[in-house]
Structure formats: structure tokens, C-alpha cells
């Protein structure tokens, strides 16, 4: 089997994005643009991948810190042919095929790339290019063919005659070429064209002139090869990508009540028979188990959710873990570092931050749980606050198993409540409480009979 190498072109500025951010770093479905095409290429398990960077090179490199790719810098953007030559050094001694694609084509499929490689090798071609027939081919290079339908070359829009501009078949900008042919052909490419650039597609005419075989593969759905050049195209491609991600989960046994308002990043996983309501965003490294129910209006980022979890209407969860059978919301926020055990209940207007909560524990109403560890089967009453911050430092609280915290309680950290502690309602607890103890604040309760009526009479007099 011949070796496969990949060159990903990502040196261009993306002027039409009108952005300080390099084009390939604009996020789409939760990832920088170029990581989508890179992912499709990586699925082919190539022997080496070289990413050509130039504009914002350092920032692009930072966006993919893994060591399994090589980087080549193109100082000046002299054209796609020149960009590929910049990667030449990384292919010294390499005698296989090179797949070349752009960093701005997020919908390109691994299966298409495989089909190209197969055809390229099967036909013993020097170069194989991907083409598409578009209703609006404007802007793309056109594929020129002779009377026998054989490719004769590629002409760029700006260099094309009026007649050539009427051709609907375009160069998708994805190529497979034998490494030897590629680099030798590129060293002869000239820049005597309208843009004064070294065009990669010129290798097609060079190969044909040398009597080599040039093959083409046509994509069925033109969207697959479309690039992102403007923010309008970014929005359109994001919509296409989102639809395809949603379709994937629908086919995998996940119910989406309203796919139009469901936003799932490519990096998310979801178990079967989970039901997802409208206006839900699942982002980053989020994973959702099987048979979960997400009512709707949910914003989840980097969250691990086990099976049979119920997220009621309107919840925001960030960098946390939720155990099986838990029920959260409505109107709850779980902030980073929070870990819920099995069957935990977090109710309305509860906020948790770095809260480790044991199995079966409940905090159902109006509560702030910050920097706290709580054992199993405890009940945190309405209006409980862990006072974790004194304006200078953050402190931790520890609450044992089967603890009953009465409503309207403030726990002043650092503090430990042992197992089976009972906190009377409206307590401010400042000291550790041993297991099994009751803690309460003594406050005198006074009752004045008939007070309300007297007060009303008095106020009436005043209003006159
Ligand atoms: C290119 C093709 C065109 C094809 C189209 C498909 C050329 C000359 N033309 O045109 O036939 O229809 O793609 O989308 O190749 N880049 C660099 N360095 C450079 C120039 C470009 O790295 O010096 C990178 C860009 O960042 C981009 C890719 O190469 O990722 C394509 O460049 P772009 O300028 O967008 O080419 P097109 O004009 O779209
Ligand atoms: Ca382009």
C-alpha cells in the first residue's frame, strides 16, 4: 500500500471576513474552521500531515497544540501552488500520494476523500481532482474538457473567457497527487496570470503535457466542497453542518423536538432514546447518556451527563458531571467543578459551583452551594447559602450524609457538618458541628396580639 500524506492549506488571510481573527480560526459548530477539514483528513490515518500557515501563523498553531501534525510557514501568500511548495521539505524521501485540501472547507467528507484516493490509485493517475457542478460557479476555477470529455486543464475565474465562465463544473480545490510528480510539477509553475500568483491547479495542464493520467471525482452535493470566504458563507456553512449533525443524532435514535433550534457541536455525543427539547445548545466536549430528557432552553458546555437524567426547562451547565437519574431545574445553574452523584435533585434557582454532591441528596429551592462537598441523602433546605467568600479568600464547606439543613440557613466557611447533623431553620452556622448534633441560633420570639389592626388604624389616620 502506498503511503498517504496530507497538506492542509491555511495561510491565507481571509480578507473578506473583515476580521482581526485569521479566517481558519473562526469557530463553526464549536471548532475553529480548519479543524473540520483536518478531522476529515485525519480519519484517513495518513502517515503525515503538514499544515501550511502564514497569516496569524502562531495563533493558528496554538489552536491545535497536539504534536501529530507538522507545520510549514508560507511567509508571503504567493498562491496555492507556492503554498504547497512550502510544505515540500516535510516530504523529503516520501514516495507516496499527497492529499491537498484547504482549511476553509468544513463539510468535506472522509468518504469523498477515500473515493478520490481509490480512483487515483486504481487508475494510476499523477493527479486526481475533485470537481462539482454548481448552479452558480462564479468565483471558482472551471474545469476544461475536450470533445471526448477528457480534462484538459483548469482556468481561474479571473483568467477565464466569457465562454469558459459559462462552464458549470468547477475545481473543488481538493487534490490527490503522487508526491514525486507534485513537487516536480510545482517547481515549473509560473505566475504569468491575472493575479500574479503561483496556481496549484496548473499542475493539471503540466501533467497532461507530460502524458500523465489526470482523473476527476465529482461530488454529488456541491455544498460539501464549498469554502468559507465571508461571514455570510460562515453562517450558511454552519447551518449546513448543524443540519448534518442533527440528522446524524436523529438517525442514531435521539429525538430532537425542534431540530431548527437545536445546536450540537461536532464534538458532542448523545445516547439513544434521549429526548431534546427546543432551544438547546450542546457544546464542546459534552456527553449525554441514554434515555435523558432535556425539556428545552438548555445551554450545556463540556458537561458529562449519565443515563436517565432529567434537565427541566432552562438550565445552564458548564464543565461539570451529573450522575444517573439526577433531576435538575427548572432555572438552575451548575458551574465548573460541580459533580452530582446518582439521583441528586437540584431544583429551581439553585446555583452550584465546585460542589461535590453525593447520591440521593436534594437541594430543591433557592440555594447557593459553592466550594462544598455534601454526602449522601442529605436535604438542603430552601434559601441555604454556603458563605464561601469573605472578600479576600474562598473557603470550603463539608456536609456529611443524611444531614438536614433547615431553610434560610447560612453556613460560614470553612465549616464541617458531620453526618446526621440537624440544622434548625434560619441558622447562621459558624463553627463545626459534630455528627448527630442539632445546631440552632437562639433568638427570642415575641408575639404581640392585635398588633396588625392597631397598626392599620394608626396608618389610616396618617393618610388623611
Ligand atoms: C482555489 C482554486 C480554484 C478553486 C477554489 C476552490 C487556485 C489558484 N484556485 O481558488 O481553482 O475553484 O480554490 O475553493 O488554487 N492559500 C495559502 N497560500 C496562498 C494562497 C492560498 O495557503 O498563497 C490557501 C488559503 O488560505 C485557502 C486555500 O489556499 O485555504 C485556497 O486559497 P483561495 O485564495 O481561497 O483560492 P480560491 O481563489 O478560492
Ligand atoms: Ca477559497
Image (spheres, rainbow, N blue to C red):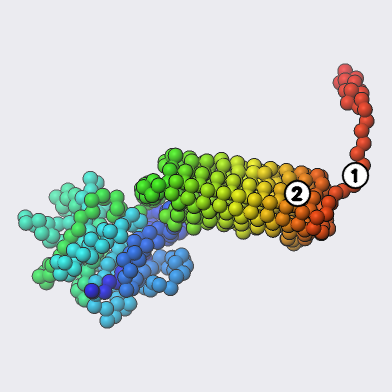
In the rendered view, does 353 fall on the left or right side of 463? left
Q: Say what secondary structure mark 1 lies in.
A: loop
Label 1 near ligand 1 (CB < 8 Å): no
Q: Is residue 235 visible?
A: no
Residue marked by disc 1:
443
* Quarter placement of the N terminus: bottom left
In the rendered view, does 304 fall on the left or right side of 98? right
Residue with the most extreme bottom position: 93
Q: Nearer the viewer, residue 237 or 122?
A: 122
Picture quadrant where residue 97 is located = bottom left
Picture quadrant where residue 400 is located = bottom right
Q: Tags 2 and 1 in contact by the CB under 8 Å rule?
A: no
Q: Nearer the viewer, residue 275 or 3?
A: 275
Picture quadrant where residue 202 is located = bottom left
Q: Say what secondary structure mark 2 lies in.
A: strand
* Quarter placement of the C terminus: top right
Q: Position of residue 386 (x, y in %)?
A: 74, 53
Q: Is residue 222 visible?
A: yes
Residue marked by disc 2:
404
Q: Position of residue 115 (x, y in %)?
A: 23, 61
Circle 2 or circle 1, nearest the eye = 2
In the rendered view, does 354 fall on the left or right side of 416? left
Amino acid at each position: 500500500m502506498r503511503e498517504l500524506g496530507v497538506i492542509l492549506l491555511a495561510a491565507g488571510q481571509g480578507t473578506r471576513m473583515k476580521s482581526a481573527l485569521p479566517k481558519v480560526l473562526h469557530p463553526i459548530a464549536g471548532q475553529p474552521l480548519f479543524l473540520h477539514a483536518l478531522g476529515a483528513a485525519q480519519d484517513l490515518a495518513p502517515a503525515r500531515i503538514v499544515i501550511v500557515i502564514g497569516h496569524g501563523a502562531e495563533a493558528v498553531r496554538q489552536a491545535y497544540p497536539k504534536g501529530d501534525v507538522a507545520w510549514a510557514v508560507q511567509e508571503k501568500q504567493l498562491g496555492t501552488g507556492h503554498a504547497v511548495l512550502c510544505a515540500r521539505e516535510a516530504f523529503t524521501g516520501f514516495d507516496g500520494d499527497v492529499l491537498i485540501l484547504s482549511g476553509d472547507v468544513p463539510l468535506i467528507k472522509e468518504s469523498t476523500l477515500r473515493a478520490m484516493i481509490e480512483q487515483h490509485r486504481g487508475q494510476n493517475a499523477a493527479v486526481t481532482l475533485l470537481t462539482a457542478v454548481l448552479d452558480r460557479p462564479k468565483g471558482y476555477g472551471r474545469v476544461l474538457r475536450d470533445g471526448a470529455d477528457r480534462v484538459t486543464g483548469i482556468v481561474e475565474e479571473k483568467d477565464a473567457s466569457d465562454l469558459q465562465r459559462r462552464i458549470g463544473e468547477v475545481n473543488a480545490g481538493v487534490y490527490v497527487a503522487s508526491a514525486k510528480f507534485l513537487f516536480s510539477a510545482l517547481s515549473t509553475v509560473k505566475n504569468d496570470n491575472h493575479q500574479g500568483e503561483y496556481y496549484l491547479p496548473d499542475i493539471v495542464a503540466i501533467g497532461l503535457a507530460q502524458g500523465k493520467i489526470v482523473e476527476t471525482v465529482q461530488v454529488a452535493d456541491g455544498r460539501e466542497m464549498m469554502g468559507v470566504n465571508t461571514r455570510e458563507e460562515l453562517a450558511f456553512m454552519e447551518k449546513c453542518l448543524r443540519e448534518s449533525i442533527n440528522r446524524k443524532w436523529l438517525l442514531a435514535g435521539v429525538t430532537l423536538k425542534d431540530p431548527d433550534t437545536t445546536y450540537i457541536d461536532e464534538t458532542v455525543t448523545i445516547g439513544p432514546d434521549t429526548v431534546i427539547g427546543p432551544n438547546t445548545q450542546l457544546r464542546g466536549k459534552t456527553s449525554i447518556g441514554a434515555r435523558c430528557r432535556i425539556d428545552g432552553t438548555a445551554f450545556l458546555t463540556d458537561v458529562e451527563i449519565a443515563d436517565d437524567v432529567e434537565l427541566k426547562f432552562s438550565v445552564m451547565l458548564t464543565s461539570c458531571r451529573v450522575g444517573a437519574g439526577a433531576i435538575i431545574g427548572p432555572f438552575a445553574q451548575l458551574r465548573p467543578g460541580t459533580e452530582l452523584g446518582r439521583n441528586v435533585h437540584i431544583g429551581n434557582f439553585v446555583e452550584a459551583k465546585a460542589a461535590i454532591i453525593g447520591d440521593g441528596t436534594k437541594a430543591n429551592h433557592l440555594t447557593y452551594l459553592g466550594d462544598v462537598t455534601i454526602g449522601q441523602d442529605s436535604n438542603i433546605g430552601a434559601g441555604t447559602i454556603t458563605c464561601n467568600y469573605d472578600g479576600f479568600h474562598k473557603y470550603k464547606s463539608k456536609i456529611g450524609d443524611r444531614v438536614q439543613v433547615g431553610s434560610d440557613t447560612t453556613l460560614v466557611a470553612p465549616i464541617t457538618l458531620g453526618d446526621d447533623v440537624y440544622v434548625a431553620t434560619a441558622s447562621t452556622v459558624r463553627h463545626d458541628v459534630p455528627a448527630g448534633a442539632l445546631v440552632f441560633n437562639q433568638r427570642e420570639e415575641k408575639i404581640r396580639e392585635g398588633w396588625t389592626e392597631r397598626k392599620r388604624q394608626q396608618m389610616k389616620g396618617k393618610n388623611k
